[in-house]
Image (tube, coloured by chain):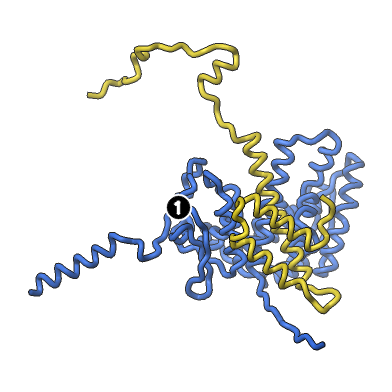
Chain colours: A blue, B yellow
Amino acid sequence: MFKSIIRLNSGAISFCKVCPRHQAFRVTLKYSTASADRKRFYEDVSISQGEGGLYEVNLDRRKLKTPSGKLFTVPNEALAIAVATEWDAQKDTIKFYTMHLTTLCNTALDNPTQRNKDQMISAALKFLETDTICYRVDEPPGLVELQKNEWDPVLQWIENRYNVTIGSSSSILGPEIPQGTKDRFRQHLSSYTAWSLTGLEFVITQLKSLVLSLGMIDRHLSVEQAVLLSRLEEEYQIRRWGNVEWAHDYDMYELRARTAAGALFVHLSSESSTVKHKLMQD
Amino acid sequence: MASLSSPLRVCREILKELRAIQGPSYKQSLAYNYVLDQFRKNKVTGERYCRAQQEARHASLTYLCLLVSTRNHLALHNLYHGKGERSPEEVAGLVGLRLPTQPGGKGWENWPHVI
């Protein structure tokens, strides 16, 4: 009699494994096959809220995973919706190079290079020494004027905002950044979460400037303005010699897309919104 | 387009982008509802300079920039960088030649002969 019961139980268990329809299982995406042949294999993209209030993205019935196999979770709904929109925007093939927010979330979740906050802050501060805005040319005079008119106001703004001194210089070595400035920035950057720092590091690497990145994150500059200031010399040359669509415009749109994704990522990772309703008294 | 200073214009532009992404059923998408919701929530404020409103405005402009730039980047990529290599027939056709045809096959298609 026992034998038949055991056989029945083992039969039931294997029956459950065979029909996975009753449980949401995870999809293992081969990110490594970066060729454009990865076809869109899902119809709907949706989001759901899991444990701990974290949001997940679902492709059809399956949950999205990061490249290292962890479950893809984000802390707020807006970011989840934006990522879902990115996945939904893919037409016949999946083009990972257009999905910047997904890439940023994956990096923040997986942390493949095992960086902690201090390392990221130090790397960001290191960039200040070779900041684009601080490097001026001596000639041609049109470019010198342009750099002075466009970059000086941003430098003034950041010096006032953070009460620091950063100079600009036209020598090869660049400006001397005093230690007080670095400490002040380090203190400010420590207030960001690890996720926000991942986004910020991405933006700094794209714009090649800590000053411009902070200006954009603090909402002093828009994305288009920050990209324009970062590419100031290129814009000057374009105005002089003409525009090449397949190079200049291509680079500009790619830079704008990445910077916008980074900025949105930083803002969404560090925001908390509350709605206060005022009573209407008529 | 003229300067996008009013939130209404920014909202319209974002929704236009979403429609370009998703096709005719964009009104049921998550992003559509979320965006409209956010714009409605932030519309009314009693203060003259509302910091949250400035933040929301910057965020909406950033998202619009993201959508527009990815679309343009993809379009330019497909236009200029998407073609890949030409096949041997096309290469021959560039100089006006055609590839020779050999009805019996070239004789080495199945080399090395695997039994």
Measured as percent of width and height from the top left, residue A88 is found at: 56, 54
Measured as percent of width and height from the top left, residue A13 is found at: 24, 67
For this view, does B40 lie left or right of residue B46? left
Looking at the rendered image, the quarter that the C terminus of chain A falls into is: bottom right
* Residue A148 makes an appearance in the image: yes
Q: What kind of residue is marked 1?
A: Leu
> In this orientation, which residue lies closer to the viewer: A126 or A33?
A33
Residue A242 position by quadrant: top right
Describe the element under mark 1 as helix, strand or loop: loop
Chain letter, disc 1 residue: A
> In this orientation, which residue lies closer to the viewer: A254 or B3?
B3
Measured as percent of width and height from the top left, residue B68 is found at: 70, 50
For this view, does A282 lie left or right of residue A100? right
Is residue A109 placed above or below A232 in the rendered structure?
below
Give me the residue at 60% from left, 35% from top. B82
Measured as percent of width and height from the top left, residue A190 is found at: 66, 71
* Residue A129 makes an appearance in the image: no
**Where is mark 1, residue-wise?**
A29
> In this orientation, which residue lies closer to the viewer: B23 or A116?
B23
Give me the residue at 84% from left, 41% from top. A236
Is residue A141 placed above or below B85 in the rendered structure?
below
Give me the residue at 30% from left, 21% from top. B112
> In this orientation, which residue lies closer to the viewer: B69 or A184?
B69
The residue at the far left in this view is A1
Is residue B104 placed above or below A245 in the rendered structure?
above
Is residue B83 placed above or below A168 in the rendered structure?
above
